[in-house]
Image (cartoon, rainbow, N blue to C red):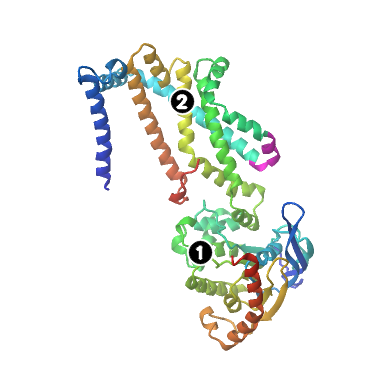
Amino acid sequence: MSRLTLLALQVLVAVVAIALWHVLTTVEIGGRMLLPPFFFSNPFDVAARIYKMFATGLVWRHLWVTLVESALAFVIGSVGGIVVGFWFARKPLVAAVFDPYVKMANALPRVVLAPIFTLWLGLGIWSKVALGVTLVFFIVFFNVYQGIKEVSPTVLANARMLGMNERQLMRHVYWPSALSWMFSSLHTSVGFAVVGAVVGEYLGSAAGLGYMIQQAEGVFDVAGVFAGMFVLAAFVIVIDAVVTLVENRLLVWRPAAAETRG
Amino acid sequence: MPAREGRGAAVALRDVTISFRLGGTADFTAVEAASLTVEDGEFVAIVGPTGCGKSTLLNVAAGLLTPSAGSAEIFGAPLAGLNPDAGYLFQADALFPWKTAVENVAIGLEVVGVASAEARARAKEWLGRVGLAPFAGRYPHMLSGGQRKRVGLAQVLIRDPKILLMDEPFGPLDAQTRQIMGNLLLELWSADRKAVMFVTHDLEEAIALSDRVVIMSAGPAARIIGDWRVPLPRPRDIGEVKLDEAFHVLHRDIWAKLKDEVLKGYARTGGG
């Protein structure tokens, strides 16, 4: 199938969905609306709302806040995950001692931590960053740990026979292997950074996309909720596209077939 | 690397026994009381049935494995830790998948402190020598099995090791590629005649390449059960040498002994 046909079909799906939404929320069928506009708004109202958000420039501040929170959560969570992942993988005793606690912390639904972070860190961006960090950290940590543990024994033996010392092994073998695992889970970890930020905003904040949606919901402004959701979706798609670009650049050495791990 | 010629054999394994602990109390003895000497400049092939511990013996010479009993000496000095005089070409893929062909070859020099520009230049030279100059920028997964072996060969040889350890390096390759790789190996080897320990299960390959063929019995507790000199003249072409009368005589002799071991090996491993 050509790119153009594919694109046309993809657009078609959106057109049909929006048309259905429009018809069901504006045309009476059998004497009543199948989708009451109070709960479902309608495409034109939502589009007008999105337009207004950008025209007044109101949305940029919220987008920026969410972006900053996501980025900070991603960076801090990744650095933490890499450091602890390396530490655990190179020191099996430490890993064994902490193993039950890591499992416990990872099993905890992170949403329950949000109120605590708000208490500790206030309503500003840091409570959202903290929530994102708890999500990103574990993904990166497990991948880095696995990446170091799963270095092919032959490659390792080869590296040692080539005369690498511990530091060189780290740089030429463990580090690239760990990074490759981390990068292969980049979509997941970046996605979770955004989830952490938005959920945190939703549960208590003064700015951000989650805050926007929560505010609209609080006054039964369904058009506002949908508008916020669409902006959030577009935001995530843009970020995902950037991640794909970065990934293709960084994992150029990897065969295409083995690109889904984590 | 310090010059150590004239101080004993390149590799001298004396009564080497290697046992592994298999969960619980049972020990598994892979190799029992194996003695083997490889002189400097000598090409020795080690042949034996599948699972007889050939690779284990190689790992002892590499210093990757410490024998449970017996000793390993390298140029007259007892081996402790990794063998710095040895280059090891592994059976499985051992290239760094995150490095390009030229980076994979250059790394052998970079680890000993050669400046990266010079290491790269010499790596390119070596890639040319193994016939891969146009593929310098490719990553291992973009190369064929034979090409990866060539990169591996360059990676090992660029460090100019005194001893070359090869563990069924051409095992996974198809017949034609094996022959081409064999000739390439002989050509590179004849330039400076390193000591070679070449492990294979292919008797024809062993005779065609080497100066001496050593036969091991079926494992467990494999022993060295035969040692033949190969009287074929050098330089050799692997394809042509197989047509030589002396080749056939030797092959028949060795095979008569090896056959029983191969059958024993199959019986024990269920044909695997």
Q: Which residues are magenta?
A: A89-97
Near-viewer residue (B83 or A187): A187
Residue B61 position in % (x across, y down): 70, 64
Residue B119 seen by the camera? no
How much space separates mark 2 and mark 1, taking CA atoms? 47 Å
Residue A89 position in % (x across, y down): 64, 42
Near-viewer residue (A214 or B125): A214
Q: Residues within 10 Å of mark 1 (few under 14, many from 20)?
A: many
Let me know if residue A38 is in the magenta part: no
Q: Main secondary structure of the magenta part?
A: helix
Q: Secondary structure at mark 1?
A: helix
Image mark 1: chain: B
Q: Which residue is mark 1?
A: B127
Can you tell which of label 2 and label 1 is closer to the viewer?
2
Residue type indicated by callout 2:
Val
Q: Secondary structure at mark 2?
A: helix
Q: Residues within 10 Å of mark 2 (few under 14, many from 20)?
A: some
Q: Which residue is mark 2?
A: A68
Q: Do marks 2 and 1 share a chain?
A: no
Residue at 68 percent across and 62 percent down: it is B59
Q: Is residue A145 above or below residue B239?
A: above
Residue type indicated by callout 1:
Leu
Residue B239 position in % (x across, y down): 51, 80
Near-viewer residue (B254 or A67): B254
Please, which residue is most extreme toward the top here?
A219
